Image: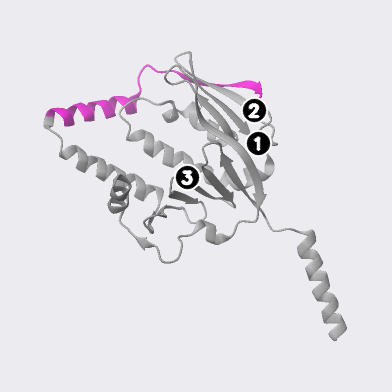
Amino acid sequence: MFKRWSLLMVLAALLCIVIPADAGWIMFEQNGDKTSISNGRLKGTSEGVSWIFNSSKKEMIFIHDEQNIYWRGTIDDYCSNSAKMMEQMMKGMPEDQRKMMEQMMAKGNQSPGHKVTVARDGNGETIVGFKTTKYRVMVDDELFEEVWLTTDASIMKAYKPLIPMIQKFNSCLGSMGVEFTPEKSAEYQKLWKTGFQLKSIRYEYGNPEIETDVVKMKKANISDQEFEVPAGYQHRSFAEFMKSQLE
């Protein structure tokens, strides 16, 4: 019996070696920003602040590592809280400024007269070992952005469950803007479904400006704790958390 049990243990160990755990990806950009993605979860970190999207729990988390605080909620929570903060801010404005802001927001959300087109611009360059496809985003027949996307199966497996959340989040951000942005258009939204972005250059103000520039991408087994709030951190209301970012 002992020999049989030992043999089973050896076989189990070999299976663990032959069949690796479902790994995620860790992405580093030129500016030092870091993004982890695994099983429909994404964590981005920049300048001491992290944000987490969890597609299975349908929630997002903001974490401030320097102050050891966090906020947790759904995309709908984020949108409604953001709208309330905007409303409170506008209440404190003089009436003429408030009306002007309301008109600008309404005009921006309607975005009349603007034509957005997204067209494939051939095979893109190989970025951190992944083949990409290049796309050109045109606004009123002028170049707005160049985007390089990869459709690598292992990356898309981790990324696809996040697409609805990312689209909803960006739509919410766009609805609070005071001017038209191409991200609000249905044509641009399709890019989120097309592939995972490894590079993008914007020409919004005439000069090229790099938005995304991945310089390193490595596969790794990422623990569940990476996508959770660290122990000891204190919860804050949405307003309190956002206020802390301005201090």
Residue 21 vs residue 129, the one in the foreground: 129
Q: For the view shown, which residue lies furthest in the top direction?
A: 141
Which residue is label 1 attached to?
151
Tell which circle, 3 or 2, labels the residue nearer the N-terminal end. Answer: 2
Residue 107 is covered by the magenta coloring: yes
Q: Position of residue 241 (x, y in %)?
A: 32, 52
Residue drawn at x 27%, y 28% is 106
Res 97 → quadrant: top left
Task: Find out whether the residues at labels 1 and 2 contact each other: C-beta distance under 8 Å.
Answer: yes
Q: Position of residue 138 (x, y in %)?
A: 49, 18
Quick one: quadrant of the N terminus?
Answer: bottom right
Determine which of the numbered discs, if any, sits on residue 217 in the image: none
**Element type at mark 3:** helix
Which residue is label 3 attached to?
165
Mark 2 packing: few (<14 Cα in 10 Å), some, or many (20+)? Answer: some
Tell which circle, 1 or 3, labels the residue nearer the N-terminal end. Answer: 1
